[in-house]
Amino acid sequence: MPLLAVPAARRLAESLPPRPAAWLLTGCAALLAGCTTAALGLLATAGALRLPPVAALEHLSRPLLGDDPTVSVPAAWGAVGLLAACASAVAYRTARHHRELRAARRGTAAHPVSGDLCVLPDAAPDAYALPGGPGRPGRVVVTAGMLRALSPAEREALFAHERAHLAGRHHLFLLTVALAAACHPLLRSLRAPLAFALERWADESAASRVGDRRVTARAIGRAALAARPEAPASHRPRTVLAATTGPVPRRVAALLAPGPVPHTPALRTGFRGRRLIAAALLTCVTFSAAGALDAAADLHQTVEVAQGETTGR
């Protein structure tokens, strides 16, 4: 199902406003990863129940469990191996995420802070939103080089952009998709459209906050031109979003574009297309979840039958 659902989710997200697009991509990734993990868990459990020690422990009649154990048991071991790999990848990515955030907080602790703004003396232009930890508020981290590259109005727009990342806890969206991708590799392709949707979400929040879309667009464009991706600020973690990342020209164009004219034939066609894509995505997710639930119910019924045979029920 992810093979079909991921392209549908990407296509549907392109036609939605940034905020619902981010929730759609994150929710889709979490649901599909959950169904994949459940399927592996059920496969491992079904094979384990056919092992003589487990069957005896659970008082199961092995002939009534069905399937050839020469097939189901090796398949179960394969599922166990995949589950172990998924668990290891999830644990590693979670630990790396927290480790990088802690290192960034330590790296910025010695620098001056004004409210939620932390200024680093680095000459390389950079700015990013650093999430807070237990008892620590989030910070907007900006370098001296970035402050010199922008006008006062553009700085306020950039700060508003980064504050939107903090307020929306956008790093958790990215972490969720990263963990989902550890459970199913096809879900990795949702990371790029999610990052774009989160940046667009922050762009629109900043434009609303400063009250000037052109100033916000100019701030994003100049910040991206000033930044040097090949030499990022030393304290920035890989797991946080920065205003200079992603397809900046598309973001600037979206901020400068006029609002769509409603009730045009093109928009009506687009709406019908979105409904078809949404229906296809919902069907994929529903089939994935229904398959896992049906397998769980079937396994439960099989176990009850096998237990009833051995206990005389």
Image (cartoon, grey):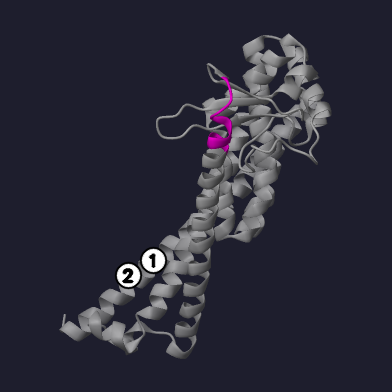
**Crowding near pointer 2: few (<14 within 10 Å), some, many (20+)?**
few
The label on residue 296 is: 1
Q: Pick whichever, 264 or 105, lies toward us.
A: 105
The quadrant holding residue 306 is bottom left
Residue at image location 39% in from the left, 76% down from the top: 46
Position of residue 231 relative to residue 123, above or below, is below
- The residue at which mark 2 appears reads as 300
**Residue 233: x %, y % from top left:** 71, 35
Point out the residue furthest to the front here: 110
Residue 267 percent coordinates (x, y): 75, 28
Q: Position of residue 124 (x, y in %)?
A: 77, 30
> Left of 295 or right of it: where is 22?
right
Where is residue 307 drawn, in percent x and y?
23, 79
Q: Nearer the viewer, residue 72 or 203?
A: 203
Q: Is residue 235 left or right of residue 74?
A: right
Tag 2: residue type?
Answer: His
**Is there any visible trace of residue 261 in the rendered image?**
no
Looking at the rendered image, the quarter that the C terminus falls into is bottom left
Which quadrant holds residue 254? top right
